[in-house]
Amino acid sequence: MRNIWIIAGREFRLYFVSPVAYAVAGMFLLILGGLFAAQLYAGLQFGQVTPDGRIVIDPLVTILLFATPAITMRLLADEQRMGTIELLLTAPVRDWEVIVGKWLGAMGFMLALLLATWIYPLILHRLTTPGIDQGVLVSAYLGLVLMAGAMVAIGVLISSLLNNPVAAFFVTLLVLLFLWIVGVFGRGTGSGSELLSYLSFVDHYYSNFYQGLLDLSDAVYYISLTALALLLGSQVVEARRWR
Amino acid sequence: MIQVEGLTKYYGRNLAIQGLTFDAEAGEILGFLGPNGAGKTTTMRILAGYMPPSSGSARVAGFDVVDQSLEVRRRVGYLPETVPLYPEMSVSEYLTFMGSLRRVPNLDDRVEQVIEDVRLEERSESFIGNLSKGLRQRVGVAQALLHKPEVLILDEPTIGLDPAQIIEVRKLIQELGKERTVLLSTHILSEAQQVCDRVLIINRGQIVAEDTPANLQAQLAGGERLRVQAAMETRELIDLLRKVPGVTRAEATGVEGVVELASAPGHDIRPHVARRVVEGGFDLLEIRPVGISLEEIFLELTREEASAEAEGVPGA
């Protein structure tokens, strides 16, 4: 357990000396701030600001789609490219501790980003009377964290498969996009459409968490996806030893 | 301390090492000598717990490298050939990270100590990415020593260092070898000769010779070698010396009047050589025994292997 925290701590601190992480964080907050300001401005012009904290959530979900691969791409791919994985794997550390530690470190950075976005709903809360529905907001953020957890885990898995961070970025983006749109195909009535819509990444989010409904089955979906990706990631690291 | 038996490793279908068997005692410095691609790094990676062998077994400090990998890794200090370190961490940050993974007690003091041991005090806050190759190598050594391992595995520890640093690292290795087992690979033969208690020569994944550097020399030199200098033409000298009983070979050295002789073992031909030159009416300037260097043994062994293989596989 301690190894996980040590590895996670290193990864987390590394984000604050990495230009990529600052670029991601900057883009993340810039886009979000711009959209927020534009919406607020439009709202004020027409004399009414919708008191809904979720105006930041919608763009946030889309931004996450691009930010996650950028956050996770180098986690293992870079170590494999530079060979630093050799010293990590010859330290008395289990393979799964490496994977979970990396995931946790990336999640730490992700949570810091999400925390920073909380400021926009707070501003909105101040501007409107009687304020925004905090319950829905908490539910939406909780769902977002669970979803981000699964996305980061997938990023870690793909980073473990590749030796090139740029390739890891695009493959992760591709997989996340697939999980994103797969629900659309599930809208039909053909066989397997239920499965497809169950797999869909966003449906689990928008149908419940986003509405302020905490449904255990959605949480289970994200958590089991996270666990599966991390398990596979550990297997990949172990399999690399056997090559 | 290290027991290796029938160690074999395939990368896909490529055979990297084949049936390696050797031991290393506690407190021994064992040298691994071989050309590039001979399988040195593969063997060391297996012993360090980085990858499992395809077949065969290896035990380090009594623990199996596959079944008790974590125990092995706790007891081994490993310096990989390329010294892969995180460039975006500072020296002390990196050592603290590795030390905490290894549960080193009194970590801060220990990190300070090893930084001193490898003389990096002035660069301890520098980012590793900004260090020269030699300094990075020292960080790698510091990392391997951090947890006071029973076994040290050093893959080409002096590569890329300047001569002064090489001497320093060799001294350090000899010092370390007094109390722990050191396995080091090198393709610098004088280094093996100088530092190691025992040398394993490995070529194409197989051990071709194993002994102390001194014994290897004696065993493979296969007789005496003499360097003879006389005030006469080389060609004449060669003709003259060929007739000396016991001489198996006489070769020009490229220096006028200087000839190298090889003789069957057990015969001291020096008196005969001296007499022959003087009786021929020439001035004898020098007779000096020449020891065959490990370098020559190495070349001989690896060349024999290569030519044997070429003959064995016609048209391949």
Image (tube, coloured by chain):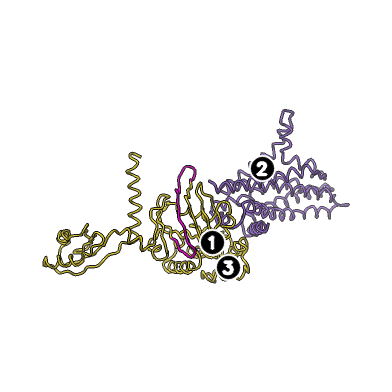
Chain colours: A purple, B yellow
| Secondary structure of the residue carrying numbered label 1 | strand
Q: Residue at x 78, y 42 (%)?
A: A217
Left or right placement of residue B148 versus residue B161 in this view:
right
Q: Is residue B190 above or below residue A197?
A: below
| Res. B267 mark | none
Question: Is residue B125 found inside the magenta-colored segment of the image?
Answer: no
Circle 2 crowding by C-alpha within 10 Å: few under 14, some 14–19, many from 20: many
Instruction: From the image, tell me which residue sits under label 3.
Output: B125
Whether residue B232 is situated above or below residue A94 in the rendered picture = below
Q: In the image as oriented, which residue stretches furthest toward the right?
A: A130
Q: Which residue is mark 2?
A: A176
Front one among A47 and A184: A184
| Residue identifier under label 1 | B77
Magenta-highlighted residues:
B10-30
| Amino acid residing under circle 3 | Glu
Residue at 40%, 62% in the rendered image: B192
Q: Main secondary structure of the magenta part?
A: strand
Work out whether residue B101 or residue B183 is closer to the camera in this orientation and state it. B183
In the image, B132 versus B49, the foreground residue is: B49
Q: CA distance from mark 1 to mark 3?
A: 23 Å
Name the quarter where the C terminus of chain B is drawn: top left
Q: Position of residue B165 (x, y in %)?
A: 45, 68
Q: Percent position (x, y) of residue A186?
A: 72, 33
Among numbered discs 1 and 3, the one appearing first in the sequence: 1
Give the chain letter at badge 3. Answer: B
